[in-house]
Amino acid sequence: MTLTRKATLIIASTMLFTIFSGLLARELILNPHLKKIENAADLRDVDRFEQAVDRYRDNLQHRIERIFSAANLLQGIEGQLDWSPVLMQLAHIGGYGELDYFILSDITGENRIVRAGEIAEKSRRLPSNSTQQEILRTAIAQLDKSNKFSASGLMLSKNDGPLVYAAGRASWTTDKLPSIYIAVRRIDDTMIASLGERLGLVVNAISHDASIQQRKHYQIGLGQRSKDDTLYSLLKNDAGDVIIHLCFKTATRAFDDKIFSPTIVAALVIAILSWAVVIVLMKRAVIYPIENLAQTMRRIRQSSNYQQKLNYKHNDELGKLVDEYNELLEHVANHTSKLEAYSYKDALTGIGNRRLFQERLDYLWKLASRRQLSLSAIVFDLDYFKQYNDRYGHDGGDHVLRQFSGLLKKRFTRETDVIARTGGEEFIVLLFDVSKANALKLANRLVGDLRLLAIPHEASPQSGVVSVSAGVASFTPIKDNSPDELIRKADEALYEAKAAGRDQVSISPDSRA
């Protein structure tokens, strides 16, 4: 009997499984779709809040522009009245309502006064001198960047926390008036709650650590709803810096997403009873033959002996599948040896890759430990290689990598020498039974070899040619060190070479060989 007929008999006894399929579709299709819609709505709430903050910024900036427009009009009738006190009054009016404070300053920021806004008069909390200077620097930089007489932005003050500000700059005919005017509002719980209330949202500010801990607890990322219907987000400034972490309390989920809801439990009970009958029927017809084939396949996989064959005597669909699998085994056997060779080489340079390096490192470390001989590691990193790629393109960068790999193969020629490319522009050389002094000498020679090639590098701020930095470490294996420590010390030496000016070699002071 063919498997098709066997399946027909089995399906006839498992009609009740249709219910389970429907419930499964609910979990795999309907609920994910509803969650996607829900997440889109949640993200729209986050966007609405961010837009509300942007509107507040724009409002502050418009207030400053109106003050300056009125001041310019007054300046035009300077001969008819003393307009200076009026300007100060305008500044107070424009910077009072819904603000913490505003700063009036000359262009240098040295001569300034701070006036309390509506909110600061209640809290009696004005910014420190360092905070004032910080705000002035940020606001003036924003004005310079926008090249306009007014600008606004968000910032995170070291002492005053997250702020929204708007700034204006003017040139008066008198030096008695401030050139810089900055209106500031603290993005505190009061402001966040007020904006959220206007939008019909429940929003709170939380600390950076609390956001990370809570998201880790719920195993969710930013913009994903937690099990208690909470959403976490960030508020960033124009430069992309995080200003504040936010927590949104969303509406309760409107659909049942529990895995073991009463409906699903009932469906599972029915499915289990149905499958109990199905399994009995399938055991002899399908399951036992498949289990036998699976055991044979497991032995092939564990032994990697792809010359074995599967044995199935029946001429049904499963028999045809077994025949195709036997053909596949033969194909895999022919290609396995080739793949093993390819898996140890870097495709671009032809030298060893990270896999080869790690296996050789473990082997040489054990060998050096048994014989109590030294093992040295040299980590090379091409200087300013990203700038080279940006200037000459990736094809040019690939050519340099191949040239450098050729230098490594010419310099390190012993059978025990291991050369590998372990990163984009990072190479590592392992030297068995080579002292740290000799390893340092070989590394310096290789650095000199590359220098002699004089490969042009116009984007290099150093020498105008491609150069390389290297870090050397040597260990005689003992209980207190390890292969990973050897590479780590070589990496630390590499960083020292980079910090010392590049195009040179540094040796780890902790080398013990």
Image (spheres, grey):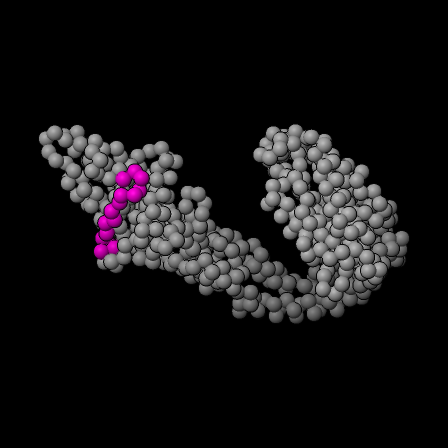
| Residue placed most toward the observer, 444 or 303 | 444
Q: If the image is split into quadrants, where does the C terminus sit? A: bottom right
- In the rendered structure, the answer to whether residue 103 lies left or right of residue 321 reads left
- In the rendered structure, the answer to whether residue 147 lies left or right of residue 290 reads left
Please indicate, yes or no, whether residue 201 appears anywhere in the rendered image.
no
Residue lying at 60% horizontally and 62% vertically, measured from the top left = 19
| Residue placed most toward the observer, 95 or 139 | 139
- In the rendered structure, the answer to whether residue 43 lies left or right of residue 496 reads left
Number of numbered discs visible in the structure rendering: 0
| Residue furthest out toward the front | 437
| Residue placed most toward the observer, 107 or 499 | 499
Residue 451's place in the image compared with 334, above or below, is above
**Is 132 in the magenta?**
no
Dividing the picture into quadrants, the one containing residue 277 is bottom right
Q: How far across and down, in percent of the image, does residue 237 sit?
A: 41, 46
Q: How far across and down, in percent of the image, does residue 81 sit?
A: 10, 33
| Residue placed most toward the observer, 335 or 91 | 91
Residue lying at 55% horizontally and 67% vertically, measured from the top left = 260
Q: How far across and down, in percent of the image, does residue 473 sit?
A: 71, 52
**Is 113 in the magenta?**
yes
Q: How far across and down, in percent of the image, does residue 171 sit?
A: 26, 33
Residue 42's place in the image compared with 403, above or below, is below
Residue lying at 27% horizontally and 57% vertically, measured from the top left = 125
* Residue stretch in magenta: 106-121
Residue lying at 37% horizontally and 39% vertically, measured from the top left = 141
Residue 394's place in the image compared with 418, above or below, is above
Please indicate, yes or no, whether residue 503 appears anywhere in the rendered image.
yes
Q: If the image is split into quadrants, where does the N terminus sit? A: bottom right
Dividing the picture into quadrants, the one containing residue 72 is top left
